[in-house]
Amino acid sequence: MQYFRLLKAYPGFLMFGFIATFASSFGQTFFISLFVNDIVSANQLSYGDFGSLYAITTAVGGVFLMRLGRRLDVVPLKYFVHFVVLGLAASAAVMALSMQLSSWLLLILALFGLRLFGQGLMGHMAVTSMGRYFDELRGRAVAFSGIGFPAGEILLPSLVLLLLAYLGYINTWWVITAAILVMLWPCLVTLHSRHPVVSVAEDQESAAQPLPLLRQRDLIRDRRFLGVLPAMLALPFVMTGILINQTWFADQNGWSAAVIAGGIALFSVSRVITSIAAGSLVDKVGSFKLIGVNVLPVAIGLVFLSFIDAGWGWFVFMALSGLSAGFNSAISGTLWPELFGIRSLATVRALYHALMIFSTALAPLIYGYLIDFELARSIWLMSTALFLALAWLLARLSLIRSKQ
């Protein structure tokens, strides 16, 4: 019932969050991976060359995200929307040009822009806004807007493959550019202002004496932030490392492409259902008590993946990973305002999001070497599960100490 109340009161702003998270898909790995073969061919690169460029541009984008993302604390949302959307459109246009002109320099610029404005700032803007403008129903607002992430994963691959078949890869990127400018831009500009009025009293601020902005250098020394950080970064790290090597798992176990695709679909469905439930639960009990629910299910899934060669082991892992992802999305959108308030929320989230990007850039490298060294799969998967359990324990201890 609370979701209906929320949707009835603020349908426009909730759709702003949903559309923004959906649009972040244009910079996500799953989306760019649909064009890898064409990118490699057009720019005469090896797959190793592309992987290196992708990792470097992702890491550099994370650095810029830390600096630009925090500006949402001082720059009005309406201006930030224009900046992010136009940056994403320009990046899509540069991607089309890079493939048309076979320019790897333009490719670097395009990948940097797509990762920064798409995966980085678009999702950051959506989740930060939900956390800032909602209080009582913050968990539900974050969960609803977060549905845009799996919605993009479900809908866009089929649409892109259809465009590629009829238009080719260069024209597909021009269509993406046009869609961002003609459809995405007007929608976000229209909907961004339909948010609740932030209660000054509830955030314990006043117009005369506003709380000072936190600095990111202070955050990296804050025991609360450092204590929960491993638990919040663990899931993106693990899922990136596993999914980037999903074809390796299929080859090792003799799975068909249908098994892999079925697992991805199961992950998305599990994530959506869990996000909705997690939003309500976060509003009832708070994010503190739920730290661990975002990592323990995927840890159990890794145990299945370690020892089960049959396809159903992959399905169990992906279903449990979707459960973790749903809780992770809700918690990551509500934990930071609970810990640090909304005054410096963009600063906190920008640092967290940038560190998450760094971790996802590092994951393929680490897991790739583990595979190259032919270390037994059960050893490194079980070690990962143990790491997740330790991250949960550290977060619990940190939060207990912060309350003392």
Image (tube, helix red, strand yellow):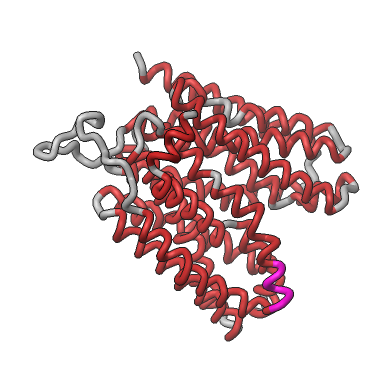
Q: Residue furthest bottom?
A: 101
Q: Which of 374 and 225 is in front in this view?
A: 225
The answer to whether residue 400 is visible is yes
Q: Where residue 380 appears, x then y in whole percent?
A: 72, 37
On the rendered image, what quadrant is the C terminus found in?
A: top left
When asked about the image quadrant of residue 98, the answer is bottom right
Q: Residue furthest top?
A: 404
Q: Residue furthest front?
A: 8
Most common secondary structure along the magenta stretch = helix
Residue at left offset 9%, top offset 38%: 208
Residue at left offset 62%, top offset 36%: 273
**Position of 163 compared to 234: left or right?**
right
**Position of 335 compared to 320: left or right?**
left
Q: Nearer the viewer, residue 18 or 58?
A: 18
Q: Where residue 124 appears, x then y in whole percent?
A: 42, 49
**Position of 390 compared to 252: left or right?**
left
Residue at left offset 52%, top offset 77%: 105
Q: What stretch is highlighted in magenta?
A: 161-166
